[in-house]
Image (cartoon, helix red, strand yellow):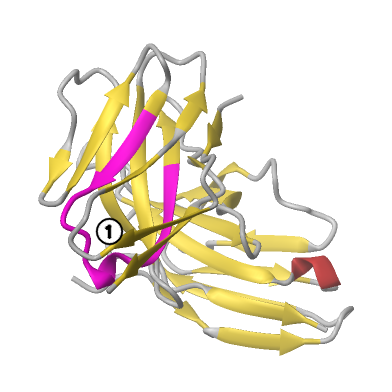
Amino acid sequence: EAGVAQSPRYKIIEKRQSVAFWCNPISGHATLYWYQQILGQGPKLLIQFQNNGVVDDSQLPKDRFSAERLKGVDSTLKIQPAKLEDSAVYLCASRTGGLAGPEQFFGPGTRLTVL
Amino acid sequence: AQTVTQSQPEMSVQEAETVTLSCTYDTSENNYYLFWYKQPPSRQMILVIRQEAYKQQNATENRFSVNFQKAAKSFSLKISDSQLGDTAMYFCAFRAYNNNDMRFGAGTRLTVKP
């Protein structure tokens, strides 16, 4: 079974530029999460999707961050414009959403550096 | 709101020895899950072990076991016969049954020394 895929793995941009990250969850997983992991900290939830609907985006800085999951499969997270404090690893995770198991499966992450 | 606290930023252990990582949490929920995730250097996060709060028996996965103390809201991870490949960041995480929001601790960096 293929795992959660993310691209790119690394991205370096200057502040005020825009950037987008892509995530392909495990096939059949209805629930998809985006996390921000700042160096030395645990992951912080940004947004959660159930199929193509947003379940929780309370911690997403909506003035600059946006995310979509139009067809209920792949998802894109965008930052526009980026700030220095956005430097972090962005993790995508997915879960079945059913009774098969409560755990989330994580992708390798995208390491973003904002200069 | 739920919070997860890992009070040991860094730990080290000699290969083949046993080490225990601490985790405490705060919640008003009665039904929830607890997890330990491992994040090796530059590699993705993987699940080590999970515990359902309603189960009194501590979860065990090969060399990994937990000490779940529900009343004390404590959830420690014991790694027996430590191996060099156990070197990683370890995160404790909490999720209530009726909430999809997973809360993570700040992590403990474990180094296994040869």
In this picture, residue B33 sits left or right of residue A43 = left
Q: Position of residue B66 (x, y in %)?
A: 25, 36
Residue in the image at 21% along x and 55% along y: B17
Q: Is residue B82 visible?
A: yes
Question: Which residue is more in the foreground, B99 or B93?
Answer: B93
Residue in the image at 44% along x and 41% along y: B93
In this picture, residue B3 sits left or right of residue A12 = left
Magenta part of the protein: which range?
B75-92
Residue B87: in magenta span = yes
Question: The disc numbered 1 marks a residue on which chain?
Answer: A
Q: Quadrant of the N terminus of chain B?
A: top right
Name above or below for residue B24 compared with residue B43. above
Residue in the image at 69% along x and 40% along y: A58
The image quadrant of residue B89 is bottom left
Q: Position of residue A77 (x, y in %)?
A: 63, 67
Number of callouts: 1
Q: Amino acid at mark 1?
A: Gly
In this picture, residue B8 sits left or right of residue B55 = right
Name above or below for residue B61 compared with residue A18. above
Q: Quadrant of the C terminus of chain B?
A: bottom left
Residue in the image at 79% along x and 53% along y: A62
Residue B37: in magenta span = no
Mark 1 Cα-neighbour bin, 10 Å: few <14, some 14–19, many ≥20: few
* Residue extending furthest toward the left: B62
Q: Is residue B52 visible?
A: no
In this picture, residue A57 sits left or right of residue A75 = right
The image quadrant of residue A115 is bottom right
Name above or below for residue B58 compared with residue A10. above
Which residue, given by chain and number where applicable, does mark 1 sit on? A28
Q: Position of residue A67 (x, y in %)?
A: 64, 62
Q: Position of residue A60 (x, y in %)?
A: 71, 51
